Image (spheres, coloured by chain):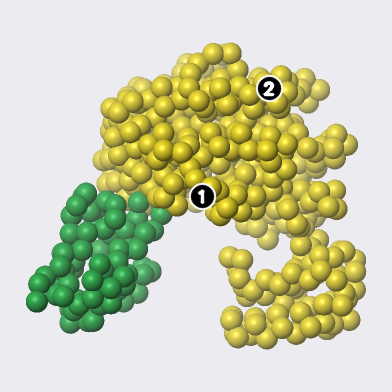
Chain colours: A yellow, B green
Amino acid sequence: MSTGISKLLIANRGEIAVRIIRAARELGIATVQVVSTADHDMLAARMADQVIEIGPAPATKSYLNVERVLAALAESGADAVHPGYGFLSENAAFARAVAAAGAVFVGPSPETIEQMGDKANARLSAIKAGVPVVPGSDGRIETIEVAFDVAATIGYPVMIKAAAGGGGRGIRIVRSQEELDQALQAARAEALAGFGDGGVYIEAYIENARHIEVQILGDGETFVHLHERECSIQRRRQKVWEEAPAAMLPADLRAELCASAVRLAASVGYSGAGTLEYLYDAHRNAFYFIEMNTRIQVEHPVTEMISGIDIVREMLLIAGGAKLGLRQEDIRINGHAIEIRINAEDPSRSFFPSPGRIEEIVVPEGSGLRFDTGIYAGYTVPAFYDSLLGKLVAWGQDRPAAIERLKQALDATFVGPKPTTLSLHRMLVRDPDVISGAVSTQWLEDWIARAPRFGQPTS
Amino acid sequence: MAIIQIVPPVPGILYLSPTPGAALFKQPGDAVAAGETVALVEVMKSFLPVEAEAAGTFVRYLVDNEANVEPDQAVCEIEG
């Protein structure tokens, strides 16, 4: 397969850099890996055709430094840049600078990144495309009469949020009309005291929300979805366990959800791979768009396992100027896949970071298993970057089969001697709530708070 | 009066103020309570407090802001 790209610079590190190099190599594209001074030993640097050092260990001085990455681009003569996830992947100015340098940014246009990267803009785009968003008041609530009307329309429970609040502060949950008047007054007083601004607004309160997201691909003219993932098992808003498809979603709602994602992608003329994130409210049996990620995501392998589509390959083909070669009717769900993130963190010590040397790594191979990683035995995990060591993915013909395969694989996996989150996953895979799928975005934190004990810290 | 050297719980990037541009956690001569935060250490995108193990008087920082701290490296001194 030929593409319009002959040499690709990977502006990232860790497991995703390895993943991108593999996809590029399959397409006959030469690879250039940028590294900080701390990363010369990482797996991607060992694999790439060319390595260019771009600065000191702290990411702000290397992987986040636009000028240094652009200098490496010029030096290498690469004609495209894959930004991976995190770092500069959703930086419109960087995407613009890559184009100005005469190279291709593997991702959507800078305008799309700006439009969909801003939460308020993305919400407006969703409303215009007829995609449901979390229902709420149009701006601030001035009178109790308006509050009654809005809350009655949305349906209880609702949240009163401080307009000037953020990060979960200044939020009150109201479960019935009887509570509303008093709660509104209290919320205003709190908002004024806490933020110097008494403005409040009302939003639906989604109890036991589940995180569902839809993978889409577009070439600017044709748009398809690769079905959905569920990533409700999170700690501090970081996903730790991801699945495809979302097994508990009713079939009619799944079709509606995926169609809405394609509609939104089409409305902005999307080009590349993207993910639309939603909250699912089982109580109201409704889904609400919350934000879009205009890049590859960590959990993309579960979608690849059930669809048979190599998403990074598709990104490179689209960026190289090819038309999308996939038709929606050919993209089917085959079985079920689960990904767990193995992080250099100690679950028995409040997930304390555990960088350091990997002495031994054993990961089972076989039918229905996949392991994406950037480490190897003898590699020292630097303290400067995120704690993701690898992603173990298990596929089965249905969800119970995937869970069983994951359980077997986890029991046969060893990464040491430093503690990792493998001990957490060995407990999760046996948990009745996980097995029955009775989880929400709050579930893992509650579970950790009452967890009896984790296994041996070194296991 | 003994000089106590404070070592962060993990190696990483050391910050001498709570937020960029803010005043330093401690100036020479400041009183330090046991368990008080005297610096932050960033490791794997987490910011962890560096706490004084005993009360005393702050003497000085031994490293610069944003310095990369090695295992067992002391970052400040307290006279206790």
Residue shown at 66%/34% (left/top)?
A: A243
Which residue lies at the image location 85% right of the left edge and 53% below the top edge? A284
Q: Quadrant of the N terminus of chain A?
A: top right
* Chain letter belonging to callout 1: A
**Which amino acid type corresponds to the residue marked 1 in the rendered image?**
Asn
Q: Which residue is mark 1?
A: A91
Farthest-out residue, front: A452
Residue A269 visible in this rendered orientation of the protein: no
Residue A361 seen? yes
Q: Residues within 10 Å of mark 2 (few under 14, many from 20)?
A: some
Provide the chain ID for the residue under circle 2: A
**Residue bearing the label numbered 2:** A401
Q: Residue at x 79, y 51 (%)?
A: A281
Identify which residue, A71 or A378, lies in the foreground.
A378
Q: Nearer the viewer, residue B53 or A338?
A: B53
Residue A136 percent location from the top left of the image: 80, 65
Q: Position of residue A50 (x, y in %)?
A: 32, 26
Q: Quadrant of the C terminus of chain A?
A: top left
